[in-house]
Amino acid sequence: MTGTSPIAPIEFRASPEPTLGVEWELALVDRDTRDLVNAADPLFELIARRGLSRSERIHKELLRNTVELVTGICRTTGEAMDDLGATLEQVRELTDELGIDLYGAGTHPFAEWSGQQLTAGSRYAELIERTQWWGRQMLIWGVHVHVGIDHRDKVLPILSSLLDYYPHLLALSASSPMWAGQETGYASNRAMMFQQLPTAGLPFQFDTWSQFEGFVHDQRTTGIIDHLNEIRWDIRPSPHLGTIEVRVCDGVSNRRELAALVALTHCLVVDLDQRLSAGEELPHMAPWLVQENKWRAARYGLDAIIIRNQACDERLVTDDLAELLVRLEPVAARLGCTAELASVADIVAGGASYQRQRAIHRGAQNLRAVVDSVVGELE
């Protein structure tokens, strides 16, 4: 332990049911140039002026080129998607007035970081002051899924075991193959960019809640964080909500794929929760294997050959996904998301967003056409 002060307990406000919450980040793009546009301020002015009934579901983010849609507490994937859909409808009426479109992907294919404006607020200003060039580079968007957990002592074992499925979620959602006008060779350049921030990237794997409390104590004592939400792990506990928050996925362009990813995340967490409750010791891989899987999924997407267990057995991620979907069918039935889980296979069959973007770019040789295609998928 770094400091000498006592370690403060962290209360986990347990969720009696495995409820859902979804956060969907979308970029704002100009209808003519297709570049990012710093239009969040006029958008939120319109939201306030119109007194939108769902204004509490619409949030600002680090940069003024972004809007985030969030759900309330939901019980099923379908309920979460209806919640987001109602908010999206209201937001799009206002973006139409402003002559801007909503864009759902992990990165923008040609925008330059130097033209982006920071959202007002001391928290964001402090982040950029600390992180400098890397912080200003964060032209990235993702999807976050919260799943309720009924006891804090389940959180860390589930989190560690859930990391075994990191490459599945990233490969399916990968939507950031281009950066600053170039194809990067990565399916998810966003995943590689975001981990450059301090406290971002893969989580540490703790055995007990007290170890997590000790970690947070050291982070606060040394000034690394002031608040728990400054721990920006790809999967993290959210004690104030009583959830595990899965932040693996790239930005998503359409509601059908979003529903598939939400259902898969919900089923994975609940399956691990049920197995733990039944007395099973959950499997988890060593951190260096998890790290390699993250890189492989970011680099190769659905063509990634991933490490599946501590024995270092390897398998094509899509083959493992096919088997996983069958195994999770009973869980999906209990959670009311059978159709949404089954639609995960449609992403594999039709190609993930990074593959669709590459095909458009190579056919049109025009990055604006890539933005058009992503915007069009939301339509």
Image: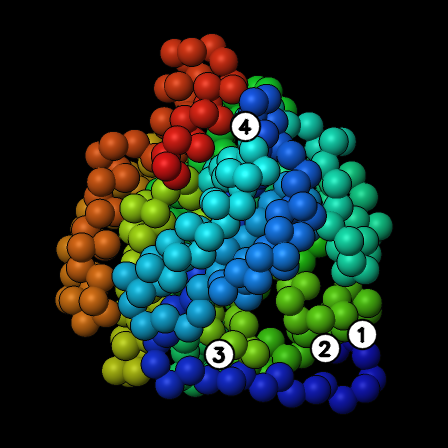
Tell me what residue is drawn at x 25 percent, y 82 percent.
278
Q: Nearer the viewer, residue 310 or 247?
A: 247
Tell me what residue is drawn at x 46 percent, y 52 percent.
90
Question: Could you tell me which secondary element the residue under label 1 belongs to?
Answer: helix
Between the residue at mark 3 and the residue at mark 2, the CA separation in whole angstroms equals 20 Å
Q: Quadrant of the N terminus?
A: bottom right
Mark 3, residue position:
242
Which of the two discs, 3 and 2, labels the residue nearer the N terminus?
Answer: 2
Q: Residues within 10 Å of mark 1 (few under 14, many from 20)?
A: some
Between the residue at mark 4 and the residue at mark 2, the CA separation in whole angstroms equals 47 Å
The residue most toward the front is: 50
Between the residue at mark 3 and the residue at mark 4, the CA separation in whole angstroms equals 40 Å
Mark 2, residue position:
217
Which quadrant holds residue 172? top left
Which of the two discs, 4 and 1, labels the residue nearer the N terminus?
Answer: 4
Indicate whether 79 appears above or below 258: below
Mark 4, residue position:
31
Question: Could you tell me which secondary element the residue under label 3 belongs to?
Answer: loop
Mark 1, residue position:
221
